[in-house]
Image (spheres, rainbow, N blue to C red):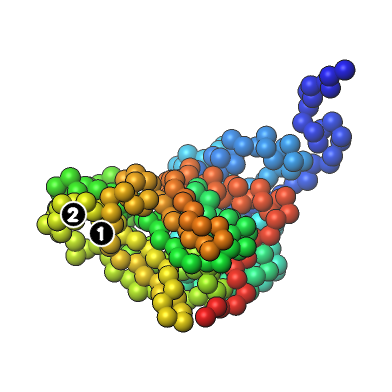
C-alpha cells in the first residue's frame, strides 16, 4: 500500500515543538534588504525544521527612511537589541564599527554570519579564535552566492593544495570587458559608476584591494590559518590602456584582474594583478559579469567554480544558507590551524 501524502509539515505531524530564534541584522543596504526579503520568502523552510525566525532588530543609520522590507521589520538606530539575539547577521561593510559592535557579542559565544571580507581580511588577528571555535559563518564573503568557502573548508582539505587563481571582482570584469570593446578606462569606469557597479571613490575595486581581501580569506583554507592580508602583493587595473588590451587581443589573450596563490620556493606567493590570459582560459570563458575560481589540488586535480559574485539577492542566498547550516548544527567556517611552509 502506498504511503499517504503528508498534508502537514513533518514537524507538525510529529508534534515537534516550534522553537523561536531571535535574529539581529547589522546594516540594511541592498544585501541587508535582500536578506530580509529572502528570509520572509523562505519561511516555510524554517517552519519545516520546527523553527520560527523572529527579527528583533535591524540597525540602520536612519530608521525613518522608507525601505523595501517585510512589514513590521524593527528598524532602529540603537544596537541594544544585540543583547537578545541568538544569531547576528552583519552586512555593514567596513571594519571599525562592525568590529566594535560584534566584539562583545562574539565574546559571549554566539554565532555571527557575515559577508564582510574587509573585516575578515584586516581584523583576522582578533577574529581568528572565534573562527576556530566555529562561531563565524562567511560563505558570502568571497563569491557571494557561489559556494567556494564551504568546499574549501571541508572536502577539499583531503587534497594537497597546489595553486589557486580567481577572478572575484565584478566591477573590474565589467570595465575590462568594455575596454575590449574599445572604450577607455576612464569611460568604462564612469559607466560602471553610473550603473552602480563601482563605488565612489572606486579604489577598493579597481585598485585590487577588494580582490585581495577575498584572497586572504581563501588562503586561510589553503596554506595556513594565520595567513595575513599584508602578505598579498596588490596591483589594480588603473594602468591598463586600450592599446595594451588591444595588443593582448591580437595575441589571443584577455586581461583579467587575477587573485593568485601559488608555491614559490619554500613558501607561498599571493598576489592580485591584471594578467593577460589565453582567451580559452577558464577564467576568461566564465562570462563578463561572473566570478570564477580555478582550484588545483594534487589528489582532486583542477576544479572550476563560477557564478554570481555580487548583487543583493545573490549574496543573501549564501547568508540564508549559512543560517540554515547553523540551525542544523554545522559549525562555522573553520580555517586551518597552522601555517605550512
Dot 1 corresponds to which residue? 276
Residue drawn at (31%, 48%) of the image: 280
Circle 2 — which element?
loop
Where is 18 relative to 119, above or below?
above
Where is 30 relative to 40, above or below?
below
Looking at this view, is 70 or 44 the one in front? 44
Quarter location, residue 137: bottom right
Looking at this view, is 74 or 203 the one in front? 203
Please give the label number shown on residue 222: none
Q: Could you say where residue 94 lies in the image, as x and y percent from the top left?
A: 44, 65
- Do callouts 2 and 1 mark residues in contact (Cβ within 8 Å)? yes
Name which of mark 2 and mark 1 comes first in the sequence.
2
| Tag in front: 2 or 1 | 2
Where is 326 relative to 50, above or below?
below
Please indicate whether residue 151 sits to the left or right of residue 285 in the image: right
Looking at this view, is 301 or 336 the one in front? 301
Circle 1 — which element?
strand
Q: Quote the CA–CA distance across marks 2 and 1.
A: 9 Å
Disc 1 residue crowd, few under 14, some 14–19, many 20+, Cα 10 Å: many
Q: Is residue 56 visible?
A: no
Q: Could you say where residue 163 lies in the image, as x and y percent from the top left?
A: 45, 65
Residue drawn at (48%, 44%) of the image: 314
Dot 2 corresponds to which residue? 251
Q: Single out the residue that lies furthest toward the top.
A: 1
Residue drawn at (28%, 62%) of the image: 275
Q: Could you say where residue 121 lies in the image, as x and y percent from the top left?
A: 47, 69
Amino acid at each position: 500500500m502506498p504511503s499517504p501524502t503528508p498534508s502537514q509539515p513533518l514537524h507538525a505531524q510529529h508534534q515537534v515543538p516550534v522553537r523561536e530564534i531571535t535574529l539581529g541584522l547589522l546594516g540594511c543596504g541592498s544585501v541587508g534588504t535582500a536578506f530580509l526579503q529572502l528570509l520572509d520568502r523562505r519561511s516555510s523552510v524554517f517552519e519545516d525544521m520546527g523553527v520560527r525566525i523572529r527579527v528583533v532588530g535591524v540597525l540602520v543609520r536612519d530608521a525613518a527612511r522608507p525601505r523595501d522590507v517585510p512589514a513590521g521589520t524593527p528598524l532602529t538606530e540603537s544596537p541594544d537589541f544585540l543583547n537578545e539575539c541568538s544569531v547576528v547577521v552583519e552586512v555593514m561593510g567596513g571594519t571599525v564599527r562592525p568590529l566594535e559592535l560584534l566584539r562583545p557579542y562574539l565574546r559571549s559565544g554566539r554565532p555571527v554570519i557575515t559577508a564582510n571580507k574587509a573585516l575578515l581580511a584586516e581584523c583576522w588577528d582578533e577574529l581568528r579564535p572565534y573562527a576556530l571555535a566555529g562561531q563565524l559563518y562567511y560563505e558570502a564573503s568571497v563569491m557571494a552566492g557561489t559556494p567556494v568557502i564551504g568546499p574549501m573548508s571541508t572536502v577539499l582539505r583531503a587534497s594537497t593544495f597546489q595553486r589557486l587563481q580567481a577572478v572575484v571582482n565584478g566591477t573590474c570584469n565589467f570595465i575590462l570587458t568594455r575596454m575590449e570593446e574599445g572604450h577607455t578606462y576612464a569611460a568604462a569606469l564612469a559607466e560602471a559608476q553610473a550603473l552602480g557597479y563601482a563605488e565612489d571613490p572606486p579604489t577598493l575595486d579597481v585598485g585590487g584591494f577588494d580582490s585581495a581581501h577575498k584572497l586572504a580569506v581563501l588562503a586561510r583554507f589553503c596554506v595556513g590559518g594565520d595567513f595575513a592580508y599584508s602578505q598579498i602583493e596588490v596591483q589594480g587595473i588603473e594602468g591598463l590602456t586600450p592599446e595594451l588590451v588591444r595588443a593582448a587581443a591580437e595575441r589571443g589573450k584577455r586581461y583579467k584582474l587575477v587573485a593568485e596563490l601559488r608555491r614559490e620556493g619554500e613558501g607561498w606567493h599571493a598576489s592580485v594583478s591584471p594578467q593577460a590570459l589565453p582567451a580559452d582560459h577558464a577564467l576568461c570563458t566564465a562570462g563578463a559579469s561572473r566570478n570564477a575560481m580555478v582550484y588545483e589540488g594534487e589528489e582532486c586535480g583542477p576544479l572550476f567554480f563560477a557564478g554570481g559574485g555580487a548583487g543583493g539577492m545573490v549574496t543573501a542566498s549564501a547568508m540564508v544558507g549559512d543560517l540554515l547550516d547553523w540551525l542544523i548544527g554545522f559549525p562555522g567556517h573553520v580555517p586551518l590551524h597552522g601555517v605550512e611552509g
